[in-house]
Amino acid sequence: METITFAWLLVILTATSPAVKAKYYSGSHIIDVPTTMKETHLHFFMHDILSGNNPFSVLVAKPKNTVVKEGNVGPFGAVYVFDDPLTEGPDPKSKVIGNARGLYASVSRGSDATLLFNGDLEFTSGEFNGSSISVVSRDPLVLVKEVAVVGGRGKFRMAKGFSLINAVFVNITSGDAILEWHVTLFHQ
């Protein structure tokens, strides 16, 4: 009897609740929160190489009944893992300062080629040795783009921010690219 009473009470409360008026945007306001956050700017290059006998990015999954040609980031559903070097300059022989490891997937079914980028960019030298930033963002395949920094480790613990990425070299045939990163971080 108690179960039936409870069920009827839920039905009555649900039926008499006012309708929720939801909007996409309800406004922004400034909040005054004391902070001890630091702001850091980073500049480096990422070498994403798909070609050759020892590529830094490799295809690990693709849609059924499809062919992925070398250099083509792939049809909708193609997934790659990467272990790319991070360097001080655009020359592949410049000083390696870290590595970017993660995965990206082709997530657009339309003509707007888009990846979902999920990566941990760890620094292995200098002041930030052992620290990393986490990037999880939509990555439109355009020459200049912005991606979100959603976290970090070490000196970048609790990092939030963004990176403007400029493609300084792209080989359409092989898929190889060198990307220049300008990162702005807010962290502890």
Image (cartoon, rainbow, N blue to C red):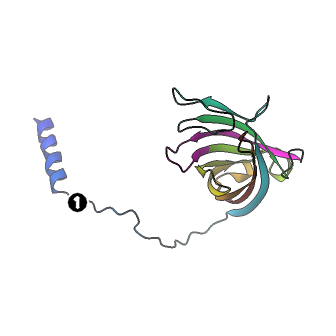
Q: Amino acid at mark 1?
A: Ala
Give the extent of the magenta segment. 92-117
Q: How many marks?
A: 1
Q: Residue at x 32, y 61 (%)?
A: 22
Q: Is residue 127 above or below residue 4?
A: below
Residue at horizontal 20 percent and vertical 57 percent from the top: 17
Q: Quadrant of the C terminus?
A: bottom right
Residue 122 in view: yes
Depth check, front residue: 182 or 20: 182
Residue 80 at x, y = what percent? 64, 35
Q: Nearer the viewer, residue 92 or 188?
A: 92
Q: Can residue 188 be spotted in the picture?
A: no
Q: Residue at x 43, y 70 (%)?
A: 27
Query: Is 101 placed left or right of 114 in the picture?
Result: right
Left/right placement of residue 171 relative to residue 150 reads: right
Tell whether position 109 is magenta: yes
**Which residue, given by chain and number where applicable, does mark 1 sit on?**
19
In the image, residue 97 lies at what x, y percent? 83, 47
Helix, strand or loop at mark 1:
loop
Q: Is residue 79 above or below residue 143?
A: above
Q: As drawn, which residue projects farthest toward the top?
A: 65
> Relative to residue 61, is residue 124 depicted above or below?
below
Q: Position of residue 61 (x, y in %)?
A: 58, 29
